[in-house]
Amino acid sequence: MGEIIAVYDDLGHRTGSAERAVVYAEGLWHASAGVLVRSLDGRRIYVHRRTDTKMVFAGMHDCLAGGVLGPGEDPAAAAVRELGEELGIVVAAADARLLARAAWDGQWAGRPMRCHLFAYEVRSDGPITHQPEEIAAGWWWTDAELRARLSDPDWPFVPDTRVLVDRLLRDRPGRADPGAA
């Protein structure tokens, strides 16, 4: 049996669980949690390229470390887990100063999946340690550098994050004070 993940309805209510392969093949709604890593001074975002062996969006770029929710898993707990697994950044789930629920949750109804997205932001300068199965390379960019790349619709950037990126950069916590943590 493959990995079991939480299944949701189109309104965002958890309805059960199923194998990840079934969820993707049948286009069932599920949920993922992602974390935007912003430098301590608030001026840079950590961007990465996914490995070519990923099941979904292989080799594409992203600015969220994240993944799907397991059965019964809280989105914030999944965000903390994924941040630690993918980038080696350890954050206590209860530490609201480091992991703030952002105002840019959303959903993506594409293929091969339909997903409710729970987005968070953390301030960290690292160290960053890539999970070799997930992340091929990574670097720091300013918001302007990321926007410039995203202006090219052919640049291979994951489509589910792409639908959030304008709100992600515009509505980020501490925007008025880039040094705020």
Image: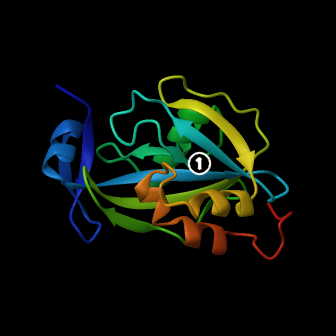
Q: Visible in this render: residue 72?
A: yes
Q: Nearer the viewer, residue 137 or 167?
A: 137
Residue 112 in picture, x, y percent from top left: 25, 49
Q: Position of residue 86 (x, y in %)?
A: 55, 34
Q: Is residue 44 left or right of residue 33?
A: right
Which residue reaches farthest top?
A: 132
Seen from the viewer's position, the closer of residues 39 and 53 is 53
Quarter of the rendering occupied by the N terminus: top left
Viewer-nearest residue: 40 or 101: 40
Q: Residue at x 32, y 48 (%)?
A: 72
Vertical comparison of 48 with 143: above or below: above
Question: Nearest the camera: 71 or 61?
Answer: 61
Residue type at tag 1 = Ala
Quarter of image, res 128: top right
Residue 95 shows up from this direction? no
**Residue at image location 21% in from the left, 45% down from the top:** 24
SS at badge 1: loop
Residue 73: horizontal and vertical position, in percent? 37, 47
Question: Measured along the vertical axis of the image, is residue 78 above or below residue 103?
Answer: above
Residue at the spot 81% in from the left edge and 59% down from the top edge: 43
**Quadrant location of the C terminus in the rendered image:** bottom right
* Residue receiving disc 1: 93
Q: Residues within 10 Å of mark 1 (few under 14, many from 20)?
A: some
Place of residue 55 in the rendered image (x, y in percent of width and height, measured from the top left):
33, 34
Total label count?
1
- What color scheme is it? rainbow
